[in-house]
Image (cartoon, rainbow, N blue to C red):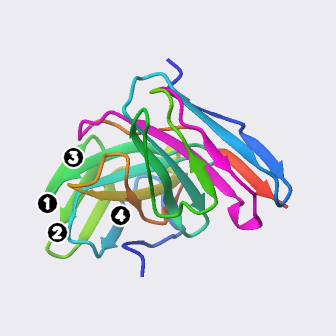
Amino acid sequence: NAGVTQTPKFQVLKTGQSMTLQCAQDMNHEYMSWYRQDPGMGLRLIHYSVGAGITDQGEVPNGYNVSRSTTEDFPLRLLSAAPSQTSVYFCASSSHLWGNTIYFGEGSWLTVV
Amino acid sequence: QKEVEQDPGPLSVPEGAIVSLNCTYSNSAFQYFMWYRQYSRKGPELLMYTYSSGNKEDGRFTAQVDKSSKYISLFIRDSQPSDSATYLCAMSALTDSWGKLQFGAGTQVVVTP
């Protein structure tokens, strides 16, 4: 049981480049989310999805796009990378039922130079 | 002002001591309260969750919620060096999904042998 799998684990981008962070879960969870973690800021929600074909913005959505074509996958796209997007990104998934655990991936470390 | 405030620490305690962590929040709609543990370069893992006010105990961990004061606490008894990690509080309103959380900045805990 792999849980939540994120790729890549480390990435260096140049300003203006685009890239996609991949997230896959094998638990048939309805909910999937992307968070970014910055020093002193905790985790902040970027985008989330309550099921295939349904996405919504979180607290810090600017500069990021998501789509949810399948239950298993929830990729995060950086359209034109900026140094302010240097961060650690975590994907999470959970069942829709309250009280069930939210599972986080291992994180993706992104540096934009 | 952040909706959830948490002292970043670091909090250093000797092995066997009680670790006391807390968060304050401003949104009275928050009903679900969680504590996550995050080891260095890893994703957060759920330790405990509580609904509304009250106490919850699980082994060496006790979570308390005081909604009248908008204050939550986590106590770790008989602390071990393996408890050294960053502890994040998180919370959510009843109307929000389980995948849409507001996190504190996290408190770094160091338990010295």
Looking at the rendered structure, the secondary structure element under dot 3 is strand
The residue under label 4 is which amino acid type?
Answer: Ser
Query: CB of mark 4 within 8 Å of CB of mark 2?
Result: no
Q: Give the letter of the chain under mark 2.
A: B
Judge whether residue A92 is colored magenta: yes
Q: CA distance from mark 4 to mark 2?
A: 18 Å
Q: Determine whether, in the image, residue B103 is placed left or right of residue A18.
A: left
Q: Quadrant of the C terminus of chain A?
A: bottom right
Q: Which residue is the site of mark 2? A: B67
C-alpha separation, residue under disc 3 versus residue under disc 1: 13 Å
Which element is circle 1 on?
Answer: loop
Q: Name the residue type under label 2.
A: Lys
Precedes in sequence: disc 3 or disc 4: 4
Is residue A17 in the magenta section? no
CA neighbours of label 4 inside 10 A, class few (<14), some (14 to 19), many (20+): few
- Residue A87 x %, y %: 67, 58
